Amino acid sequence: MINIISPINQLGYGITGLNICKSVSQITDVSLWPIGQPTVTNEEDARCITELISMSKMPVFEAPQIKIWHQHDMSSFAGHGLRIGFPIFELDTFNDLEKHHLSSLDRIFVCSQWAKDVCLSNIDFDEDRIDVIPLGVDSDIFKYVEKEHTDKTIFYNCGKWEVRKGHDILYKAFEEAFTEEDNVELWMMCDNPFYSESEQSEWIGLYNRSNLSKKIKFIGRKETQQEVYNIMLQTDCGVFPSRGEGWNLELLEMMSCGKQVIATDYSAHTEFCNADNSLLVQIKNKELAYDGKWFHGNCGNWAEIGDEEISSIALAMREVHKNKKKNQAGIETAHQYTWENAARKILEVINNV
């Protein structure tokens, strides 16, 4: 039995919790202690999560526990068994509260070597008690289908509207890369449920005021992976100019579909992004993370993206437009990162403790 404490929804932690619960429960018994109200998008997941929650009514308090949640809230667990925290973070520094909570754990799971290095540089914690558990992609859904190539190139970005994700500069790179005469489009499937309607409108306004606004398309939030996949299939290249990522599942999904990807060479997605499967934008410097909303310049650093990096993104976009192709290396990479592999690694670590 393993006790898992996690949100279950369609956001970052919730998607991770859902897939780890499903994959681990295929190998051993799982008792789910949900954080917040679980939300799933299909009947099969609903049945699985309901069953796993019902297991918490017959708790095994001495069982190992995995809490998939923020590093500042690792105090409450579901029993007195092995306490494993699984935080997902984007910056290179922890504050005092985060250090205290992480230091109190028996083990720490992280999804990338970059994240492990951040932990080791911030807290006094034995290296052999920090395990890299890469997350997965559902390659049964996100799979390659040959797309009829035309003169038009469709670039794609998805995720929460955020400065962290580079949404404040992506339209600038698009403008630098192309003119109205170029047969290109930029599809933005972005939404942030934590923003007000007016804040969402401000983000959309940035792109509507672009001199290439007629080539920019906004796509509403999709509730199921199949719907997301159907959109991805119509595109040619994913552009992810992130200043910092905890994993970047959307990028890995694009790879799994055989799409070309453009990404910064910084933070957690460097676990699976390399020069063979991605067009990487070199990051030379870091800066204090500040967006006036979630990050206030006092909680760590992220990648600095200035004019030089914007030009590099634009250059990569032009390169894709000239030479669209199947990302075979990306497909092969994505096939290495499955939720089943994550579950096996989790069980391997726990069984060896």
Image: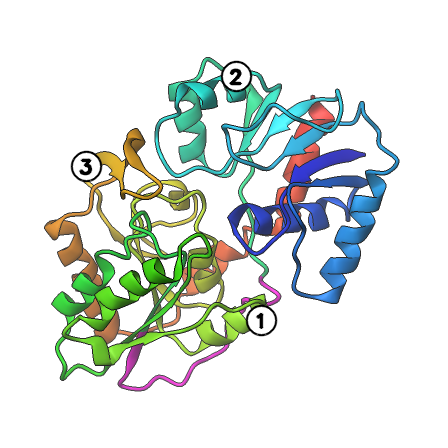
Across and down, in percent, residue 104 comes to 57, 16
- Going by the numbered disc 2, the residue's amino acid type is Ser
* Residue where numbered disc 3 is placed: 285
**32 above or below 85?**
below
Q: Is residue 228 left or right of residue 298?
A: right
Q: Main secondary structure of the magenta part?
A: loop
**308 above or below 352?**
below
Which quadrant does the N terminus fall into? top right
Q: Is residue 229 left or right of residue 216?
A: right
Across and down, in percent, residue 257 comes to 48, 68
Q: Is residue 183 magenta?
A: no
* Residue where numbered disc 2 is placed: 103
Residue displayed at 84% across by 45% down = 54
Please tell me whether mark 3 sits on a helix, a strand or a loop.
Answer: loop
Please tell me whether mark 2 sits on a helix, a strand or a loop.
Answer: helix
Residue 314, by quadrant, is bottom left
- Going by the numbered disc 1, the residue's amino acid type is Gln
* Residue where numbered disc 1 is placed: 226
Give the residues in magenta.
139-154
Q: Is residue 45 left or right of residue 248?
A: right
> Tag 2 or tag 3, which sits nearer the N-term?
2
Please tell me whether mark 1 sits on a helix, a strand or a loop.
Answer: helix
For mark 2, does the 10 Å Cα neighbourhood hold few (<14), some (14 to 19), or many (20 or more) residues?
A: some
> Tag 1 or tag 2, which sits nearer the N-term?
2
Residue displayed at 22% across by 62% down = 316
Distance, label 3 to label 1, CA atoms, is 38 Å
